[in-house]
Image (cartoon, helix red, strand yellow):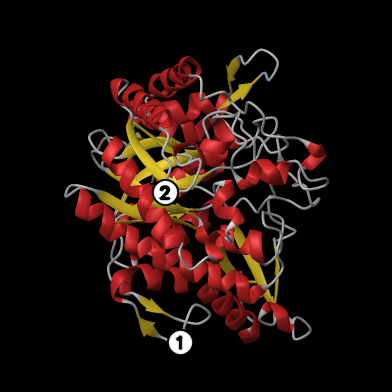
């Protein structure tokens, strides 16, 4: 019997890279992040997004799209910037919509299916001035914006993500305060998260009313919660509680329409029932959860990364971005599969300034994704975060997630070793045994029987 040479993904699998407007386009000063960047101590080193990776210049964007296509990718995730399209309430910029239409046409010409995110952390200044997502009318405003986007781009795009990581937007902006508006109030944070999910349900139905062949979902950042001590009943219960709050309450809302604590008291919202055609999974890390009765404000739970595990680059706050745990992606996929929806990994990556970890990270995480598929998980695509090193919000330029390095003086791009690895995987529609043998030899026996 011939020895298997590739961990094959299903036919039609999408191989992509994920990006976001504010982090790539540059030279936009009309959203709340632009003003946040002007405040002292908000951004590492006082940096600003500035020209970012210069994607608002279509020639630059096209060259990066060429790079993605040359790797063998067949999709690219990007977002549209609300503040460019609707710079004032009810006033739409036809030039910006035309520019996005041109950008999407460039993707399609290169065989890259566009996955368009409608909200990726940024709000127009006029919306921020009216209370942002705490404003009860935000659903009306967002529906108005989305309607105009679908009318302008719907002839080229059928694959939509309504909102990226609502839990990160709510948690970072309203609980810990390191994102705008810098609030530290758990009640307000959960109110914002609930409103974002309710608006998602409304927008899901709106898009389908405008486009009968649409594929619509939401991207959720899932940190897999593991008990710090698996033998401790208290740690296991704490991990389950945090997992419910951070993950299961969101998945339950967008599939069954039921708002479980802390989002509600079990009431079912009709507009949220079956409000996704797919679930977008953003996975970066696992978290170890320990019961700690001194931390009542944190659900009696202490969260940390395993100090004995492999940790990624440090963040602005001095700690690691996360624990590198490929098996965590398998666990996340198995958990999400229980909700009965197709899955796309809409983000997965690692900050790695010298690219010595990323090649192995990509190959081993995709091997674990393959393992989940073998056990029946309906996984249909993978988007690596990100294509080119970009502006990583309050971490500025410190965290390097890209497959390509950028010289900010000249704009020149340089491929990293990880770009070659990911390209070979995409072109093989799976993880070649030879790739694992070269960069992760200790894992080969886990996937390829001798």
Which residue is at the front of the view, 298 or 210?
210
- The residue carrying pointer 1 sits among few (fewer than 14), some (14 to 19) or many (20 or more) residues within 10 Å by Cα, namely few
Outermost residue on the left side: it is 212
- Few, some or many residues within 10 Å of mark 2 (<14, 14–19, 20+): many
Which residue lies at the image location 45% right of the left edge and 64% below the top edge? Answer: 137
Q: Which label belongs to residue 141?
A: none
Dot 1 or dot 2, earlier in sequence: 1
> Of discs 1 and 2, which sits in the foreground?
1
Label drawn at residue 265? 1
Left or right: where 234 falls relative to 215: right
Q: Nearer the viewer, residue 349 or 330?
A: 349
- Using residue 78 as the reference point, say whether residue 171 is left or right of it: right
**Label 1 to label 2: alpha-carbon separation:** 30 Å
Return the x and y of residue 375 as percentages of the image width and height.
31, 59
Relative to the observer, which residue lies in front, 114 or 305? Answer: 114
Q: Looking at the rendering, which quadrant does residue 383 occupy?
A: top left
Percent position of residue 330, x then y = 45, 57
Q: Percent from the top left, x then y, of residue 17? A: 45, 35
* Mark 1 element type: loop
Residue 31 visible in rendering: yes
Q: Circles 1 and 2: CB distance less than 8 Å?
A: no
Q: Is residue 59 above or below residue 193?
A: above
The residue that appears at 41% across and 39% down in the rendered structure is 92
Which quarter of the image is occupied by the N terminus?
A: top left
Q: Position of residue 188 (x, y in %)?
A: 61, 72
In the figure, is residue 145 to the left or right of 400? left
The residue singled out by tag 2 in the image is 345
Which residue: 64% across, 31% down? 355
Callout 2: helix, strand or loop?
A: strand
154 in relation to 52, above or below: below
Judge whether residue 445 can be spotted in this image: no
Q: Quadrant of the C terminus?
A: top left
């Amino acid at each position: 019997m011939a020895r298997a040479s590739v961990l094959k993904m299903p036919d039609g699998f999408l191989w992509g890279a994920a990006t976001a407007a504010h982090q790539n386009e540059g030279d936009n000063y009309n959203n709340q992040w632009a003003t946040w960047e002007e405040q002292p101590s908000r951004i590492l080193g006082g940096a600003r997004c500035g020209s970012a990776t210069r994607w608002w210049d279509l020639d630059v964007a096209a060259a990066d799209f060429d790079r993605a296509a040359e790797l063998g990718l067949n999709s690219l995730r990007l977002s549209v910037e609300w503040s460019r399209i609707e710079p004032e309430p009810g006033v739409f910029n036809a030039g910006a919509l035309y520019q996005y239409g041109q950008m999407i046409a460039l993707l399609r010409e290169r065989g890259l299916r566009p996955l368009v995110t409608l909200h990726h952390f940024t709000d127009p200044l006029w919306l921020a001035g009216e209370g942002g997502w705490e404003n009860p009318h935000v659903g009306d405003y967002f529906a108005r914006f989305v309607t105009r986007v679908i009318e302008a781009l719907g002839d080229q795009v059928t694959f939509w993500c309504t909102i990226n990581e609502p839990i990160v937007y709510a948690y970072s902006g309203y609980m810990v305060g390191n994102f705008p508006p810098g609030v530290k109030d758990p009640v307000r944070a959960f109110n914002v998260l609930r409103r974002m999910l309710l608006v998602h349900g409304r927008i899901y139905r709106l898009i389908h009313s405008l486009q009968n062949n649409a594929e619509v979902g939401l991207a959720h950042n899932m940190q897999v919660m593991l008990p710090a001590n698996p033998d401790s009943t208290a740690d296991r219960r704490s991990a389950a509680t945090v997992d419910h709050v951070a993950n299961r309450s969101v998945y339950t809302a967008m599939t069954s329409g039921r708002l479980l604590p802390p989002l509600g008291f079990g009431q079912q919202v009709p507009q949220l029932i079956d409000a996704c055609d797919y679930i977008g999974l953003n996975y970066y890390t696992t978290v170890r959860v320990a019961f700690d009765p001194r931390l009542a404000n944190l659900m009696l739970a202490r969260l940390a990364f395993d100090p004995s595990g492999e940790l990624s680059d440090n963040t602005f706050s001095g700690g690691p971005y996360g624990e590198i745990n490929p098996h965590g992606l398998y666990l996340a996929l198995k958990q999400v599969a229980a909700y009965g929806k197709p899955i796309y990994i809409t983000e997965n990556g690692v900050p790695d300034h010298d690219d010595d970890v990323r090649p192995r990270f990509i190959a081993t995480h995709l091997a674990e994704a393959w393992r989940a598929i073998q056990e029946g998980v309906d996984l249909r695509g993978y988007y690596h975060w990100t294509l080119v090193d970009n502006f990583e919000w309050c971490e500025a330029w410190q965290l390097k997630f890209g497959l390509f390095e950028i010289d900010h003086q000249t704009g020149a791009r340089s491929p990293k070793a990880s770009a070659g690895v990911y390209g070979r995987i995409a072109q093989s529609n799976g993880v070649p045994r030879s790739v694992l043998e070269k960069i992760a030899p200790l894992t080969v026996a886990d996937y390829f029987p001798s």
